[in-house]
């Protein structure tokens, strides 16, 4: 399969703007081995992405689905769940959120060309335009990225941009597949993990992500936990950004100083008059209630930042990962996340040796982490940080 230059998009894309058309084309696409997908959406004043357009390509044709005109998404949901059809997207984190909201499911099996490019050692977190230029020598404009995709009618420039954004995905997919070889199964692991973590919802643990939360006492942490729970639930329920409920930069100060009046609330960093007007009384109520809850309900203090000794070992981990990445011909950033590195280091601080976390699954456990843990423990035996 060979790509066409952008100017070769001579045929008009096929519009799908009613339920029957969508059902008919989903039936047609179900006979294919792979389809390419993309979305355009607006996400400026909302918690959830607001769908503006869904693009489908079969390699030669482009189809534009108007989500403002479709009410029955079951045919597309069924197509997404068909294990015989590979769904090809690029850097698809937010696209998966759009599909989850519309169809209550996500495309599977998934082939993310951005991830695939990393496994092929072409580049880590490579943009679609850069990848297209490198693989197919095609320059793709990005002039409509931030336009209003919910307006109707869409402009000719928007339609062309959206069509070109999906037209070349299948040729890119074919080239990357040939370059992956044995790493194909590793990519499949990571793509599957992406589909299992779309729009995660855990308001009870949101407080653990607040910067400097480790500085707070258990009573203050309970206030923080209550505020973060309210913030998460209210943002989703009202479909507004979290910072419209409580600014991120206010959370620590609210938990630490626990203002008891509107006047005190006004002194909190990043707290705006609008937020105080809409949510001020609720915030004060949460603080009062949480501060009076029994001691048994208070969370344990969070662990302190890693000590200097752990940072030295962290440097050793980084060096070993670079060596391993060179052996595997992979970008080092693909091998291990910062969170996993921290998890390994905290385990070492507790047990004075490295071990594999029980929660770690997938190809990294055997290919990356097991040999790494063995190397690190051997270094420790010889007193080498």
Image: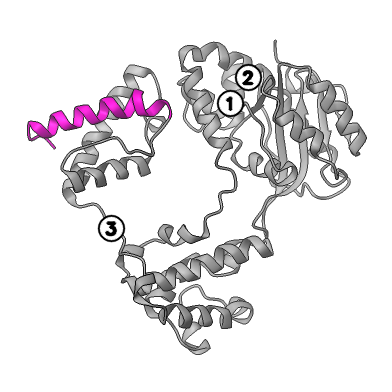
Q: Residue 303 carries which label?
A: 3
Label 2 sits on residue: 172
Image quadrant occupied by the N terminus: top right
Mark whose residue sits in front, 2 or 3: 3
| 213 versus 364 height, above or below | below
Image quadrant occupied by the C terminus: top left
The stretch drawn in magenta includes residue 368: yes
Relative depth, front residue between 225 and 115: 225
User: Which residue is situated farthest in the left direction here?
Assistant: 382
Q: In this view, does 141 lie to the left or right of 378?
A: right
Look at the image and give the residue range highlighted in magenta.
Answer: 362-385
Q: Residue 289 carries which label?
A: none
Upstream in the sequence, badge 1 or badge 2? 1
Name the residue rendered at 57%, 79% in the picture: 282
Disc 3 from disc 1: Cα separation: 38 Å
How far across and down, in percent of the image, does residue 227 sit?
A: 49, 70
- CB contact under 8 Å: marks 1 and 2: yes
The stretch drawn in magenta includes residue 188: no
Disc 1 from disc 2: Cα separation: 7 Å
How far across and down, in percent of the image, does residue 102 sit?
A: 74, 44
Label 1 sits on residue: 113
Upstream in the sequence, badge 2 or badge 3? 2
Q: In this view, does 23 lie to the left or right of 361?
A: right
């Amino acid at each position: 399969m060979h790509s066409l230059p952008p100017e070769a998009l001579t045929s008009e894309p096929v519009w799908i703007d009613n339920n029957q058309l969508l059902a008919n084309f989903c039936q047609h696409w179900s006979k294919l081995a792979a389809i390419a997908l993309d979305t355009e959406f607006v996400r400026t004043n909302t918690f959830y992405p607001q769908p503006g357009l869904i693009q489908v390509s079969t390699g030669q044709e482009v189809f534009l689905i108007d989500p403002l005109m479709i009410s029955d998404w079951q045919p597309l949901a069924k197509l997404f769940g068909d294990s015989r059809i590979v769904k090809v997207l690029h850097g698809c984190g937010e696209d998966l959120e759009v599909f989850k909201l519309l169809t209550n499911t996500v495309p599977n099996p998934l082939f993310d060309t951005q991830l695939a490019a990393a496994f092929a050692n072409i580049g880590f977190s490579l943009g679609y335009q850069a990848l297209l230029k490198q693989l197919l020598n095609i320059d793709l404009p990005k002039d409509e990225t931030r336009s209003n995709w919910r307006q109707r009618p869409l402009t000719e420039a928007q339609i062309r941009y959206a069509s070109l954004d999906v037209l070349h995905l299948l040729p890119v997919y074919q080239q990357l597949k040939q370059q992956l070889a044995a790493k194909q199964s590793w990519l499949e692991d990571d793509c599957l993990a992406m589909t299992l973590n779309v729009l995660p919802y855990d308001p009870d643990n949101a407080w653990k992500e607040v910067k400097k939360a480790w500085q707070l006492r258990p009573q203050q942490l309970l206030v923080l936990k209550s505020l973060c729970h309210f913030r998460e639930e209210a943002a989703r329920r009202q479909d507004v950004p979290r910072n419209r409920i409580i600014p991120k930069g206010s959370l620590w100060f609210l938990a630490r100083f626990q203002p008891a009046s509107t006047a005190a609330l006004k002194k909190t960093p990043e707290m705006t008059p609008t937020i105080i007007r809409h949510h001020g009384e609720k915030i004060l109520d949460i603080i009062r209630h949480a501060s009076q809850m029994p001691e048994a309900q208070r969370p344990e203090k969070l662990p302190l930042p890693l000590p200097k000794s752990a940072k030295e070992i962290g440097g050793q981990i980084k060096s070993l990962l670079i060596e391993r990445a060179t052996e595997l011909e992979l970008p080092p950033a693909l091998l291990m996340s910062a969170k996993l590195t921290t998890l390994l280091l905290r385990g070492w601080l507790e047990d004075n040796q490295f071990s594999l976390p029980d929660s770690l699954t997938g190809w990294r456990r055997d290919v990356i982490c097991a040999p790494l843990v063995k190397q690190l423990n051997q270094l420790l035996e010889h007193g080498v940080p």
